[in-house]
């Protein structure tokens, strides 16, 4: 199922790939643009009988005594399924009759149906447990679907959080899944994020405090720039909630912590082959950090380098090299010439030079960076190994195959020891050796090793991991994959 698709073009490629494997249900507000892609089924607001049935399924005993108030209540709520479901849950839980619920609704005649049911339900829930209101306001800032428990557990003592979420689920304010992930309807989120001076549950200061809690929880759980399978899986689960949060916040209101969150998301997108989107996130991180920290702050320079790397991935090599040279110069001036961050920036500039065909320039710069990192961070540090790996690739491009093989074999041994045999960077070293063995004529060894890399990548990373997908484009002749 694909929920809330904004444009048909966004899913056209996916539909073409899976068209023969089954059916996909798509929800969207866009009626046009689907010709030739999908059959369009228009959904309307339920009629009186459908709304009545939905309500009475939850409160059969109460509704059976007098059906007229049920129909009147459903009509008052505009037959909106969410509002009807929440009203029914409220009546069932509190033993309130539909007529009594209608009487309470008359206190808020100017509000939307969902806001009506929201307020009545929260009046009851917050009176028993104030945490329910806080949690619902925080949930409004994340994605609506499958908010993971690791985020929820940041909102208070886990036992109290679970009790509060359970109460919200009982009243149909949220949906609680078996793995304790939570989903929230978008209309509920919209109401929860909208200040209303006349609603004690939607005071502006409480909504802003909830936004800050939502940001704090995201920043606490989203990974740093790790490249392992665990980090990738975590980001896959958390990115929709980071994206929803960032979209709701005015860039002019970004804090240092917001900029950090945006920067981490940008690196995730860049590292996982979505440089087009990543550059927009880096742009925001740079703008916010320039405003908050200054143009020369190392964090600002780091985000700026992210833009350069995205340009390189997009083939804009000259522009990328120019910006990377500026980054190196800035770091030399701000931090010093012999700092690990400066050497790493030199190493990344060297990769761009290699792609531009300047093999000698790349080798010279990488050797300088490697010597500095071996001295400052040690020969077995992950950063040192990345630069050593890139130097091996530069040797290969320059035709210095024996040096490349020796360097990659040493890097592979250190990565197996430090990161484990299934880490993406370890698998990258193995893949580099496959290509070198093929280049020196050891074709059978190259094919056998490649097939082993693919099998290990599928087992350890899954067939949707960017590294696994990359293997499809570098398969040597004779591979069984």
Image: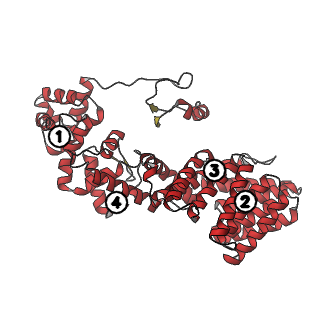
The alpha-carbon separation of the residues under discs 4 and 2 comes to 42 Å
Q: For this view, does 195 lie left or right of residue 120?
A: right
Badge 4: residue crowd in 10 Å (few <14, some 14–19, many ≥20): some
Q: Are marks 2 and 1 in contact (CB under 8 Å)?
A: no
Point out the frontmost of discs 4 and 3. Answer: 4
Point out the frontmost of discs 4 and 2. Answer: 2
Of labels 4 and 3, earlier in sequence is: 4
Mark 1 falls on what kind of element?
helix
Badge 2: residue crowd in 10 Å (few <14, some 14–19, many ≥20): many
Res. 267 mark:
none
Of labels 1 and 4, earlier in sequence is: 1
- Picture quadrant where residue 160 is located: bottom left
Which residue is rendered at x = 60% and y = 48% of the image?
279
The alpha-carbon separation of the residues under discs 2 and 1 comes to 65 Å
The alpha-carbon separation of the residues under discs 1 and 4 comes to 28 Å
Which residue is rendered at x = 40% and y = 49% of the image?
142
Q: Are marks 1 and 4 in contact (CB under 8 Å)?
A: no
Q: Which residue is mark 1?
A: 91
Res. 466 mark:
3
Of labels 3 and 2, earlier in sequence is: 2
The alpha-carbon separation of the residues under discs 3 and 2 comes to 23 Å
Which residue is rendered at x = 65% and y = 55% of the image?
457
Mark 3 falls on what kind of element?
helix
Mark 4 falls on what kind of element?
helix
Q: Which residue is mark 4?
A: 155
Of labels 4 and 2, earlier in sequence is: 4
């Amino acid at each position: 199922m694909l929920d809330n698709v904004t444009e048909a073009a966004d899913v056209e490629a996916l539909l073409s790939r899976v068209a023969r494997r089954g059916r996909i249900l798509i929800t969207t507000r866009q009626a046009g643009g689907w010709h030739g892609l999908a059959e369009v089924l228009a959904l309307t607001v339920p009629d009186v009988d459908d709304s009545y049935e939905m309500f009475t399924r939850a409160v059969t005993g109460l509704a059976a005594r007098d059906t007229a108030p049920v129909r009147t209540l459903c009509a008052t709520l505009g037959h909106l399924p969410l509002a009807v479901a929440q009203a029914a849950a409220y009546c069932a839980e509190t033993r309130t009759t539909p007529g009594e619920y209608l009487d309470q609704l008359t206190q808020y005649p100017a509000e939307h149906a969902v806001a009506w049911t929201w307020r009545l339900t929260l009046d009851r829930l917050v009176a028993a447990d104030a945490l329910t209101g806080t949690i619902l306001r925080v949930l409004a800032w994340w994605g609506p679907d499958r908010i993971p428990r690791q985020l929820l557990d940041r909102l208070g003592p886990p036992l109290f959080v679970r009790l509060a979420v359970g109460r919200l689920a009982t009243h149909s304010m949220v949906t609680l899944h078996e793995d304790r992930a939570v989903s929230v309807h978008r209309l509920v989120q919209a109401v929860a994020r909208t200040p209303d001076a006349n609603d004690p549950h939607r005071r502006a200061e409480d909504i802003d405090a909830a936004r800050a809690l939502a940001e704090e929880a995201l920043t606490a759980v989203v990974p740093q720039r790790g490249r392992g399978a665990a980090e990738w899986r975590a980001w896959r689960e958390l990115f929709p909630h980071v994206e929803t949060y960032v979209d709701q916040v005015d860039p002019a209101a970004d804090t240092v912590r917001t900029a950090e969150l945006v920067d981490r998301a940008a690196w995730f997108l860049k590292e996982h082959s979505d440089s087009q989107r990543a550059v927009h996130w880096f742009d925001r991180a740079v703008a916010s950090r320039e405003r908050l920290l200054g143009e020369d702050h190392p964090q600002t320079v780091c985000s700026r380098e992210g833009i350069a790397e995205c340009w390189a991935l997009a083939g804009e090599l000259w522009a990328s090299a120019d910006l990377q040279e500026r980054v190196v110069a800035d770091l030399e001036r701000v931090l010093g010439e012999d700092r690990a961050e400066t050497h790493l920036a030199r190493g990344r500039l060297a990769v761009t030079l290699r792609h531009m065909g300047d093999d000698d320039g790349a080798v010279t710069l990488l050797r300088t960076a490697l010597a500095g990192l071996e001295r400052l961070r040690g020969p077995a540090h992950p950063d040192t190994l990345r630069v050593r790996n890139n130097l091996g690739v530069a040797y290969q491009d320059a035709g210095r195959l024996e040096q490349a093989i020796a360097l990659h074999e040493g890097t592979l041994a250190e990565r197996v020891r430090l990161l484990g045999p299934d880490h993406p960077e370890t698998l990258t070293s193995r893949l580099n050796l496959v290509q070198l063995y093929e280049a020196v004529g050891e074709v059978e060894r190259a094919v056998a090793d490649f097939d082993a890399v693919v099998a290990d990548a599928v087992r350890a990373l899954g067939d949707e991991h960017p590294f696994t997908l990359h293997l499809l484009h570098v398969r040597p002749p004779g591979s069984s994959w």
